[in-house]
Amino acid sequence: MASVISLFLLSSPSFVAAQSKAIEHILLQTDKLKLMPYDNGSLSGWCKLEYKGSFPKTIPVRVEHKLSPQQRTQLFKPNLEQFVLQQVIPAIEKTCSGAEGFRTNYNIRLSMQDWSDSYGYYDFDSFVFRYRDGIVTRTQYYPSSAARNALGEDGINALTPPKQLDRVDKVIGQIGPFLLYPRNDPFCYGSIAHVDAEFDSTIDERDEWVKANYKGNDKIGFEGFVSEEVLPRVREHCKRFMAVELHFYERGSIDRWESMLFSLNYVGSLSITSHNMSKKAKSYARMKINQRVFGTCDSSPYCLMLGGVYLDAIYRYDTQKIAQINQQLETEYAKQARTADLQRFFNLAAEAGLNGAQNVDVKMKFPTLLISKYIYDFSRFAVSKAKLTGNRQDACFREGTKVVDTRTTTRVIDYQDQMGNYAGSAGGINIGKVYRVNPEFVELCERFCGPASGEFADFLDSFFTLEKSGHILAGLEQSIKTMDCKSKEVLQFEKNLIRLTNSVIQ
């Protein structure tokens, strides 16, 4: 690491001389980042943490940087633990050596602060490391909402500390298929009590057992399970906490399946406030939904998405399967709205300025919705992906890319009362977007890229609360977010999507 990062440590002849620098004291600085004490008090107080009575003693450090998440990952290779052991700890001990009350075994809280011009100053995320006898262990991870949006669930799961393996003697409960363990050592540190829950059954058997024995506002009943079984056991060990986070593992596996956060309110009842699933868990959930709604599929990467059977049929250009599902989708729409009502709805949308709405087939030929959403989502996600990676010349856009500007102002409509008097007006709203479109989509974009055409597909689907099309639209968005836009699978899918759309609008 030292060969990659050229650092300098601000040392002093003695700790007393350095003490006067207080919060402005720099622990470590490179051309890419700067480490400083995260403390508003004195440097001596920071070293022995006299301002805070918590146990274990935790030394707070802030890391100022202007890096994208991907650039940060590259900088800290092979991992953050090595960076803490080789760079952060020597800086702390050089600064704090000789300070009254300083301990050589302690915890470190590393807060990553984004100082880029585009975001401004804020804590992006933070990590807690346990340092004992020369060994650094990551024990906790706290992402901000910005981190959750930028990294996604898989990115968050990758940064979350792995399960402890040396704690068989620390079981706090055995209920049904579950063994419960305290996740952290010590258990009661911070406002969240983290509990690992191992299960020795299949996922379906686990959920059925919980559903049969407990009730809650969630679909399965985990709120009841945590309230009746986990919470009393946590309270035997912890007096002050505001939430319980349950981390699920298959028995014998070190890879987390999912985690659920349950927050306590002022009267002591709890509710689930977040649910993070591993990549494996999300794939399994999508497979179950696809089986229930569409049947089975395992022939391409698109099968892993929601609505994967339909997306895979486009990828393979299986016109028989596409026609079969299209019929199901049209039937689904017809059950909730008459054709005349749909036509009136589209006409009103077009009058309001939603160019593209008037081009959606009145019989709800699904590819006309799909193509408008694909162009819209591809444009916005490819641009945001370029910003996230720091690569402004994103390879998702090829030579011949066209910029389509759909910004406009909606028509002003004046209303009259029954007597013919003026009763107000509506409209005159500035709407629209700027699309970046690869050359093969330009012709279709000129027909379907209106100020709100991509969002119109999502709105129309949610307006009629349709299960099948909702899964397909969500899966399409997911494929754009997660699949390599340059892969042969994506290029083949795009070619066939264009081919399919042209076949239904001719």
Image (cartoon, rainbow, N blue to C red):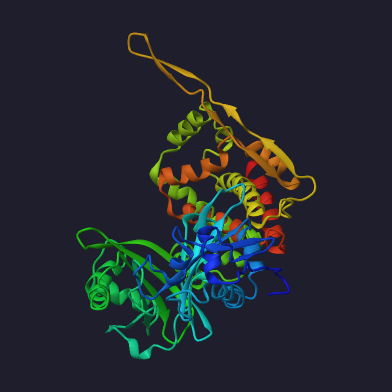
Compared with 250, 474 (above or below) is: above
Compared across the picture, whether 29 is left or right of 93 comes to right
Between 394 and 371, the one lying in front of the other is: 394
Q: Quadrant of the N terminus?
A: bottom right
Query: Residue at the spot x=74%, y=51% of the render?
Result: 393
Q: Splitting the image into 4 quarters, where does residue 52 fall? A: bottom left
Compared across the picture, whether 494 is left or right of 181 comes to right
Count every numbered label the image shows and give the total: 0
Compared with 244, 452 (above or below) is: above
Q: Quadrant of the C terminus?
A: top right
Query: Residue at the spot x=33%, y=87% of the render?
Result: 170
Is residue 230 something one can see in this rendering? Answer: yes
Q: Splitting the image into 4 quarters, where does residue 48 fall? A: bottom left
Q: Position of residue 456 (x, y in %)?
A: 52, 40
Farthest residue in the bottom direction?
169
Q: Position of residue 129 (x, y in %)?
A: 49, 74
Is residue 295 something one can see in this rendering? Answer: no
Q: Splitting the image into 4 quarters, where does residue 260 fall? A: bottom left
Between 246 and 212, the one lying in front of the other is: 246
Compared across the picture, whether 98 is left or right of 216 comes to right
Query: Residue at the spot x=42%, y=79% of the render?
Result: 249
Q: Position of residue 78 (x, y in %)?
A: 64, 76
Query: Residue at the spot x=41%, y=44% of the render?
Result: 464
Compared across the picture, whether 434 is left or right of 304 comes to right
Farthest residue in the right direction?
399
Q: Position of residue 438 (x, y in %)?
A: 73, 47
